[in-house]
Image: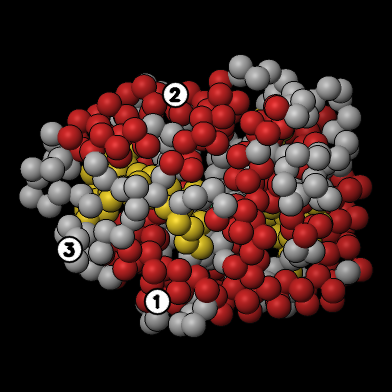
Amino acid sequence: MGRHPHVIILPLPLQGPVNCMLKLAELLCLEEIHVTFINTEHIQRRLRSCSDVESRFKRYPNFRIETIPDGLPEDNPRTGDRIVELFQSMEAESQMILREMLTSGSLGPNSEKPPSSIIADGFFSFAVEMAEQSKLPLIYFDTISPCGLWAYLCLPRLIEAGEFPFRDDDLDAPVKHVEEMECVMRRRDLPSFYRIGEIDDVLIQFIMREAWELPKAQALIFNTFEDVDSGTLSLMRTLGPEVYAVGPIHAHLNSRLAAAAASFYGLWKEDKSCIAWLDAQPPKSVVYVSIGSLACMTVDQSMEIWHGLVNSGARFLWVHREGSIVGPARDDDKDIPAELAKATEERGLIVGWAPQEEVLGHPAVGAFLTHGGWNSTLESVAAGVPMIGWPHFVDQQVNARYVSEVWKLGLDMKDSCGRKTVEEMVREVMDVRRGELLGRAEAMAKLAESSVKPGGSSYADLDRLILDIKFGRFSD
Ligand code: UDP
């Protein structure tokens, strides 16, 4: 064995990445690898009050959490629309603190258990230099989708080819320079930042650096499995670093824990009352609606979705995360229209935050109207639930396109949420094309399940990753 295996895990301080990385941490702890998990103080406070992270990890003496400031003032809302502020302050402030910890502080070479490798979110381009300085191998874990990430990495090529910035407003124009995706992608299916018209925009510059730095890591981990993403994983393997596809990570952890189910590490308190409500609904009769932890919708958009759901005749469970519906209420909507109130009372339920993995696994759920965040997409894939995508930003545009056109597990609402569209899409998934979509979704769920069992591709990749971490087998 090389150095004593001790991994530093550095997640992006957001719901999806933190939950994913904690699950990876538990998978490593099960194999007696020491893990130090770096949370921002803000995330740690919220996790402590909304999840069982502390009691859960008490069983692993080889696990500990260290906190660092995210550099933002306390009253910054840290919401999706101000995410760039978080990226900038992490880069400017948190990075310095981490570097110090790793060179001369509590995680330095002279500490009691010096680290042997770093697993960082792929968005942290500064991690390459930080790992080099600390003489530690760097493993990037990109918790967005591989297809979304590939579309990020093609940004320099699109600029070189003159495809970005777009020359006109035609979002339906096909995209030619995203390898392997030429037949699938229109401009509107590219990650949201491609709609920014300026090369020197701060977000575009972040993505350019990610495209440049990512291949310098020794290894890349993805939350996906071969059967769903073999094409994109082959592309990732051409970058150079060793590739490990260990997902769906939530199902993988459940599989390795055998009896005990894994936790969800939420930043909001789950409203479990929806499970009893689901118990009382007929099989596959409910559309579950959620736009994740960061996206927002306007009051007008929420009214369109609401009318669409009600007009479709389906039952629905809808997550209204606090602060997720923004903007002034329209005068005529101050009072909820009577038909919406009545239909919701009869066949709907609205909650603040749902236990999503449990909801998607519930027999009453027949479809998921989702913003298409990668965790939500994979959780739906693993549960065999067809999707209707209403993408907002980051990789969601790509994911929704893949769901409808590559994996054919649902529909893509893309850039439209008019009540007529919502009604038609719900009817199509729940009724008109139900057999076909459900059949494919259930078949894909079986593949996901086998991938995380002994003999499966993700199971083998995680075993390989564990051995490579234990024996320090990462080349420079
Ligand atoms: N989630 C949840 N309850 C909710 C809504 C979302 O537990 O009511 C979880 C969901 O299971 C997923 C995560 O929040 O694991 C959202 O991650 P995703 O990548 O889908 O989207 P993001 O929030 O990053 O946009």
**Residue appearing at x 26%, y 45% in the figure:** 136
**Residue appearing at x 48%, y 65% in the figure:** 246
Q: Amino acid at mark 3?
A: Pro
Q: Which residue is mark 1?
A: 256
Residue 433 percent coordinates (x, y): 88, 69
Give the vertical position of 232 relative to 334 (above or below).
below
Mark 3 crowd level (few <14, some 14–19, many ≥20, 10 Å Cα): few
Which one is earlier in the sequence, the residue at label 3 or at label 1? 3
- Image-based side of 20 in relation to 293, left or right: left
- Image-based side of 224 in relation to 65, left or right: right
Residue 260 percent coordinates (x, y): 37, 77
Q: Which residue is mark 3?
A: 61
- Image-based side of 325 in relation to 113, left or right: right
Q: Are marks 3 and 1 in contact (CB under 8 Å)?
A: no
Secondary-structure class at tag 2: helix
Q: Amino acid at mark 2?
A: Gln
Location of residue 71 by image quarter:
top left
Location of residue 392 by image quarter:
top right
Q: Are marks 3 and 2 in contact (CB under 8 Å)?
A: no
Q: Which residue is mark 2?
A: 88
Residue 465 percent coordinates (x, y): 38, 64
Using the numbered discs, state the Cα–Cα distance from disc 1 to disc 2 in whole angstroms. 37 Å
Residue nearer the viewer, 71 or 359: 71
Q: Amino acid at mark 1?
A: Arg
Location of residue 3 by image quarter:
bottom left
**Residue appearing at x 82%, y 30% in the figure:** 332
Which one is earlier in the sequence, the residue at label 1 or at label 2? 2
